[in-house]
Image (cartoon, grey):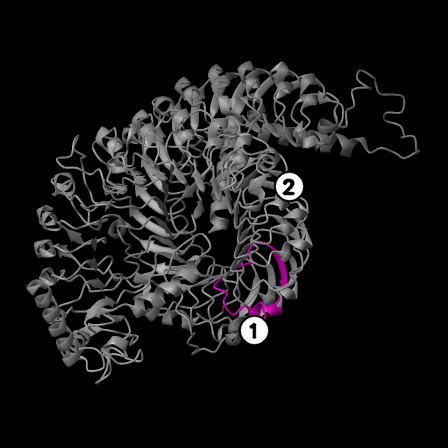
């Protein structure tokens, strides 16, 4: 009885105390709790040190009730502050959020984040049990140690708040803590012993925290007997112990993904966790089959084993997990097929088997999983008709399926009308398959569709108008198909559409004005079609547009002036169209965000004031072939971030201003080629100091060569008037490795020796020093250029022998040393060291001796020019080994120089001057299709080897001006690709082979000045040639006057000395005098040449050499 009275007294006393604190406690329900003064002051002090850029805590002010402040939750009886919800909210990123929308959302999030310092005044909140500061920016500061003294805390979330440094062990004093989330980059812990002080902990998330040194992670966490969720994703853990020291039997969720453990197999203890519902071991490099021990964990609802190296078939027992909702096995090496037993996964919501090596067919039983919302089977080897898959899924799934991904799955056939049955589809992705035929009209029935990607297939036909019925579309891609016809006229209100890509198809017609209705469109791409007509002025209404790509079409007319109103526009690509007219300042008036403008290949003229300052700061600009001249566009000097500039072929005739050169260090790509720029380039180390690609070719620059960066990849200064030595260009920073791969200094006035400074230029692939005035020999250090593919030194004054140091350049494909003064024999090692050689040009030097048979080992050789030397001996019979000339197929070898940039630039690499058809041609773009042999103007003797007729791909054969004898090979008609033959000025004899008449491509023939006899064979080609092709022989028949039909007929002498048939008197004295004078004069001048064959050859060689010298004088 006394005990009961005591209890009543204590209860009454408590009520009195409460009543004294809150007099209205026993009043009506209208009572409101007001915060405690000391706690209000603590919160205000906390706010003082907090950065709040958006003033989210505006309500935290004055004498207000702190329980009503934003983010503050008080106890509804005691009024103590119990919870602080001060997290920020980052934007979610899913397949429907395009990068631009995400960027806007992320900028807003960045501005909303709290920052600054966390004030210890929080310690005055004695009853605080919930603190959430996640997703803020505390700028790399450490987690405050005093948080470990807030003993009432049950929930602490500091995730992604940009704390850095070691996690304070004082957090281990929070003995009441149930929830701890510290995930985020920048934090680390050397051990986890402090977790032992958290016996009530149920949820622990330390994902992305560096736990590399915390080898005790399992030992500690396994002793937390209340733990239900453990997330240690991407923590740099390197090993999972074989057994835990404690008991994790209550664990419901386990995430150890992204650690790349040293373990190759999953430890068995994980499979003994009886209550586990979700486990994530993805991205850890586990190997072998999926462990059989997993089959005992039938309570699992979430299995994530993606991004490992499992390389066996999917085990049949896995299909018996009837409670499983999410199964993710993507990015492994799983083999075999998907079993029809998959229909037993009756609770499945999402299945992801993408990026494996699965094959066979997608089982029809998959369509029986009526709860399925997501199917992801991309990047496997189904090799199946897409219509068959859609038909198998068209049952109960057709009204529930939301995501269907089958990219790069080797799918075939046509899309059928069954596609329209999946009316709840939100995402449909069939990219990179071989699906063909028209896009079905039923596509317009997918009313829920937001994401559609059918790119990189073989779709054809036209796109139906009902496509625009898909009102919820956000992202659409049809690129890289063969869809034709006009782009349908937009209709209805597609207010959500943000991304529209029709590129790389065969669309034609015009672009309708209705395209201006898409107010939220961020990207419009119609690149590489045949769309014509004007660019619609309505595109100026696309107020959200950031990327406009209309390149490679047939748009005509001028650029709409309201183009300048697209204030959010960042990238404009309108190159390779037929636009013309004037572009003025109005076109750019509000383009303050413009960073890329590619408009080359049009006929546009830019007219702006001399002092125009654009509203934008460009990063990339290409106005190639515009009309910018004649003055230099001064506004370029205002572009502080311009790294890619191409104003080649723009009609500028001016000196480049010094202010432009001063800012040139910002350029990575600079192309001023094909203009009339003149003057010197200042010789300053900072000029072009960071440029990777420099093309100043085909201008009138003069003076010494400029300095360049060691990081430059391409330098083309050809076809200018630069003069002097190149030593300062090549020999600067001799101990610093150079990155240059392409160097072209052709057609300048450079002189002196080629410097011996090539040791650090080891990445050079293309070197052209031709058409200059270099002297002396090839330097020894050229041996360092082991990657060299093209070496062109033609038309200089170089001398000496071909250096053996060139042996090291084993990757050479083209060597051109024509028109120099090299002497000695042709090195025999060429045939073995330059096995990839395609072009060998030694024309117009002083090489002598025999043609080495070792050259026949050059199986890739397509052009051989040894003309105008002093070579002797016979033509090698092994020429039949020139395999590339023996085939009629053209080389697929890419004779261009590639270098990596944001636009994968390609430079023309090869060109060659060749004497073909009796004329000099320069070949460049089709050089790899040319096959030619020219050994003319030497002293070769012997017969033309019959083996040469094996070269059935040869197009030009020039053996003229030699001492060749014998017959023209009888089966020359086998050389069906020949377009040009020149055997003139030799001592060939016999008849012209009749097989020559079968050379249907032959359009140049010169057999003159030989000892050929007989009748010229009949063919359309041979009779179409001029008679000069056959003179100097004993031939008859068309096109010669002697037609072989009056041979041996004697003239009638009856009227000689009396009268001709017209009765006129013949003055025989004058006739005889003229004939005698002609005969005497002829034999005095020409007799020695006709009598002595060698004299005759020397005479014609002399005339030929005089012709080349005269040509060089005229060209200068």
- Residue 544 falls within the magenta-colored stretch: yes
Residue positioned most to the front: 1
Q: Which residue is mark 2?
A: 418
- Residue 574 falls within the magenta-colored stretch: no
Q: Position of residue 197 (x, y in %)?
A: 9, 50
Would you say 132 lies left or right of 520 here?
left
Q: Give the total of numbered labels.
A: 2
Q: Which residue is mark 1?
A: 562
In the picture shown, does residue 175 fall above or below 536? above
Q: Position of residue 213 (x, y in %)?
A: 11, 43
Residue at horizontal 57%, vertical 60%?
A: 602
The stretch in magenta equals: 537-562
Residue 955 shows up from this direction: yes
Instruction: Give the Cα distance between marks 1 and 2.
Output: 44 Å
Q: Position of residue 826 (x, y in %)?
A: 37, 25
Residue positioned most to the left: 2
| Residue sitting nearer the eye, 1091 or 764 | 764
Would you say 17 lies left or right of 322 here?
left
Which quadrant is home to the N terminus? bottom left
Q: Quadrant of residue 846?
A: top left
Single out the mark in the foreground, 1 or 2.
Answer: 2
Q: Position of residue 605 (x, y in %)?
A: 55, 68
Residue at horizontal 59%, vertical 59%?
A: 471
In the picture shown, does residue 435 fall above or below 682? above
Badge 2 marks a residue whose secondary structure is: helix
In the picture shown, does residue 943 fall above or below 292? above
């Amino acid at each position: 009885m006394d005990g009961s009275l005591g209890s009543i007294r204590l209860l009454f006393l408590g009520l009195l105390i409460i009543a004294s604190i809150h007099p209205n406690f026993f009043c009506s329900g209208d009572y409101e709790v007001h915060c405690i003064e000391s706690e209000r002051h603590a919160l205000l002090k906390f706010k003082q040190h907090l950065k709040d850029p958006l003033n989210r805590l505006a309500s935290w002010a004055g004498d207000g009730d702190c329980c009503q402040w934003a983010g503050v939750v008080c106890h509804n009886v005691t009024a103590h502050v119990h919870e602080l919800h001060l997290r920020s909210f980052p934007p979610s990123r899913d397949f429907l959020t395009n990068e631009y929308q995400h960027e806007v959302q992320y900028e807003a999030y960045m501005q909303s984040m709290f920052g600054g310092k966390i004030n210890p005044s929080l310690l005055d909140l004695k009853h605080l049990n919930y603190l959430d500061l996640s997703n803020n920016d505390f700028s790399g500061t450490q987690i405050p140690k005093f948080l470990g003294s807030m003993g009432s805390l049950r929930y602490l979330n500091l995730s992604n708040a940009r704390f850095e440094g070691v996690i304070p062990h004082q957090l281990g004093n929070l003995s009441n803590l149930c929830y701890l989330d510290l995930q985020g980059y920048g934090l680390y812990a050397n051990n986890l012993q402090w977790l032992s002080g958290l016996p009530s902990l149920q949820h622990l998330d330390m994902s992305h925290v560096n736990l590399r040194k915390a080898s005790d992670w399992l030992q500690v966490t396994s002793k937390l007997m209340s733990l239900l969720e453990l997330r240690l994703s991407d923590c740099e853990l390197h090993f999972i112990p074989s057994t835990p020291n404690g008991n994790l039997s209550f664990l419901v969720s386990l995430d150890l993904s992204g650690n790349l453990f040293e373990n190759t197999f999953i430890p068995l203890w994980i499979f003994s966790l009886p209550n586990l519902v979700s486990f994530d071991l993805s991205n850890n490099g586990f190997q072998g089959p999926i462990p059989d021990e997993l089959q005992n964990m039938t309570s699992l609802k979430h299995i994530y084993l993606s991004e490992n190296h499992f390389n066996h078939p999917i085990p049949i027992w896995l299909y018996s997990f009837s409670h499983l909702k999410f199964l993710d096995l993507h990015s492994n090496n799983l083999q075999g097929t998907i079993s029809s037993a998959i229909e037993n996964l009756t609770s499945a919501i999402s299945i992801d088997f993408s990026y494996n090596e699965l094959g066979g067919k997608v089982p029809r039983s998959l369509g029986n999983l009526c709860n399925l919302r997501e199917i992801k089977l991309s990047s496997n080897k189904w090799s199946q008709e897409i219509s068959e898959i859609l038909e198998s899924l068209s049952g109960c799934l057709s009204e529930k399926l939301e995501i269907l991904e089958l990219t790069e799955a080797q799918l075939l056939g046509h899309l059928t009308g069954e596609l329209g049955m999946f009316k709840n589809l939100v995402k449909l992705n069939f990219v990179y398959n071989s699906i063909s035929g028209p896009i079905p009209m039923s596509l317009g029935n997918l009313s829920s569709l937001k994401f559609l990607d059918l790119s990189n297939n073989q779709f054809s036909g036209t796109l139906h108008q009902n496509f625009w019925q898909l009102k919820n579309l956000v992202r659409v891609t049809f690129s890289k198909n063969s869809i034709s016809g006009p782009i349908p006229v937009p209709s209805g209100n597609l207010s959500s559409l943000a991304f529209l890509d029709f590129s790389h198809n065969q669309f034609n017609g015009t672009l309708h004005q209705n395209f201006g209705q898409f107010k939220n469109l961020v990207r419009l791409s119609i690149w590489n079609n045949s769309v014509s007509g004007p660019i619609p002025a309505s595109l100026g209404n696309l107020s959200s547009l950031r990327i406009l790509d209309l390149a490679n079409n047939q748009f005509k007319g001028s650029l709409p002036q309201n183009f300048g109103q697209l204030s959010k526009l960042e990238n404009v690509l309108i190159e390779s169209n037929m636009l013309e007219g004037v572009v003025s300042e109005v076109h750019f008036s509000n383009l303050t965000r413009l960073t890329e403008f590619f408009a080359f290949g049009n006929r546009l003229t830019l007219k702006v004031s001399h002092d125009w300052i654009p509203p934008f700061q460009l990063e990339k600009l290409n106005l190639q072939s515009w009309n910018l001249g004649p003055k230099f566009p001064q506004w370029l000097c205002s572009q502080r971030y311009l790294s890619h500039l191409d104003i080649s072929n723009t009609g500028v005739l001016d000196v480049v201003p010094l202010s432009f050169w001063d800012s040139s260090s910002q350029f990575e790509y600079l192309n001023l080629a094909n203009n009339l720029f003149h003057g010197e380039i200042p010789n300053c180390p900072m000029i072009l100091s960071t440029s990777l690609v420099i093309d100043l070719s085909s201008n009138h620059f003069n003076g010494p060569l400029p300095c360049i960066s060691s990081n430059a990849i391409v330098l083309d200064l050809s076809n200018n008037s630069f003069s002097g030595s190149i030593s300062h260009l090549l020999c600067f920073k001799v101990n610093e490795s150079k990155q240059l791969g392409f160097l072209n200094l052709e057609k300048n006035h450079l002189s002196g020796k080629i410097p011996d400074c090539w040791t650090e230029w080891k990445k050079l692939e293309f070197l052209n020093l031709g058409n200059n005035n270099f002297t002396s020999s090839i330097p020894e250090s050229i041996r360092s250029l082991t990657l060299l593919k093209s070496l062109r030194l033609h038309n200089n004054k170089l001398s000496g022998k071909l250096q053996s140091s060139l042996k090291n350049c084993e990757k050479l494909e083209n060597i051109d040393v024509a028109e120099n003064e090299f002497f000695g024999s042709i090195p025999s090692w060429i045939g073995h060291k330059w096995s990839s050689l395609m072009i060998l040009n030694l024309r117009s030097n002083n090489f002598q001796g025999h043609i080495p048979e070792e050259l026949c080992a050059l199986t890739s050789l397509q052009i051989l020019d040894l003309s105008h030397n002093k070579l002797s001996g016979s033509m090698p019979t092994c020429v039949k080994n020139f395999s590339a000339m023996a085939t009629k197929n053209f080389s697929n070898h890419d004779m261009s120089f590639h270098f990596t940039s944001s636009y994968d630039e390609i430079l023309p690499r090869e060109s060659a001057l060749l004497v073909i058809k009796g004329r000099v041609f320069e070949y460049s773009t089709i050089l790899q299709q040319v096959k030619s042999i020219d050994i003319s103007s030497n002293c070769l003797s012997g017969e033309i080897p019959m083996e040469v007729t094996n070269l059935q791909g040869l197009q030009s054969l020039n053996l003229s001006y030699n001492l060749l004898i014998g017959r023209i090979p009888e089966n020359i008609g086998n050389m069906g690709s020949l377009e040009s033959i020149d055997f003139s000025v030799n001592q060939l004899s016999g008849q012209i082979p009749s097989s020559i008449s079968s050379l249907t491509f032959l359009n140049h023939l010169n057999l003159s000045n030989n000892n050929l006899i007989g009748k010229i064979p009949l063919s359309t080609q041979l009779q179409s040639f001029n008679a000069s092709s056959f003179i100097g022989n004993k031939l008859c028949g068309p096109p010669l006057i002697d037609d072989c039909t009056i041979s041996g007929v004697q003239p009638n002498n009856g009227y000689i000395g009396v009268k001709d048939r017209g009765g006129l008197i013949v003055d025989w004295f004058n006739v005889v005098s003229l004939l005698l004078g002609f005969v005497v004069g002829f034999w005095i001048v020409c007799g020695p040449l006709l009598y002595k064959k060698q004299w005759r050859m020397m005479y014609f060689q002399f005339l030929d050499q005089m012709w080349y010298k005269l040509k060089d004088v005229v060209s200068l």
